[in-house]
Image (cartoon, helix red, strand yellow):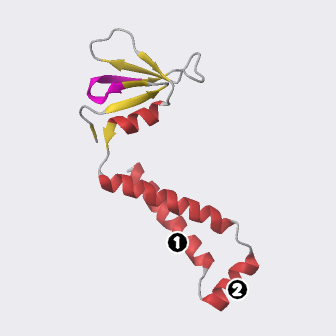
Amino acid sequence: MRIQSGMLVHLGFGKYVRSDQVTAVVPIEEDRGPGRRTFVHLEDRVNPLVASRAEDSIIRDLVQEPREVTQSRQQQEILRDLLEDLNNVNKTVRRISRDEGGLDLDRLERRIREVLQEDLLLQAA
């Protein structure tokens, strides 16, 4: 990942900075709250700006992720949403969908769990 050059990054409450001027993004730990989430340090400035957005949101806007990473993250989110929905399907509906429609929700649920587990292992490596 690399910093996007010359992009305006929203800090919240109408504050914007150029992405290539940011030198550090630090979460506020003391007196953190609405309007006070993150210190954003800029080159040529002694004191940091106080941002109302969380540090991870600001960092996502600062960096340019490869398209594959963005797509992978979106796919994982969709799989997690689907897994959550499948978890709410009762046994009778599962049996009917398998026997009458040929859709084995138990097998689908197991496969999604395997894929998400594989992605977690790859990310940890």
Asked if the stretch drawn in magenta spans residue 56, the answer is no
Q: Nearer the viewer, residue 97 or 109?
A: 97
Q: CA distance from mark 2 to mark 1?
A: 20 Å
Q: Is residue 26 left or right of residue 81?
A: left
What residue do we see at 50% from left, 56% from top? 77
Q: Residue furthest left?
A: 5
On residue 111, the disc is: 1
On residue 96, the disc is: 2
Q: Position of residue 69 (x, y in %)?
A: 35, 53
Q: Nearer the viewer, residue 82 or 116?
A: 82
What residue do we see at 52% from left, 63% from top? 79
Q: For numbered disc 1, what is the local secondary structure? A: helix
Asked if the stretch drawn in magenta spans residue 18, the answer is yes
The magenta region covers: 17-25
**Against 11, is 49 above or below?**
above
Q: Depth-wise, is mark 2 or mark 1 nearer the camera?
A: 2
- The picture quadrant where one finds residue 64 is top left
Q: Residue furthest front?
A: 14
Q: For numbered disc 2, what is the local secondary structure? A: helix
**Against 66, is 85 above or below?**
below
Amino acid bearing label 2: Ile
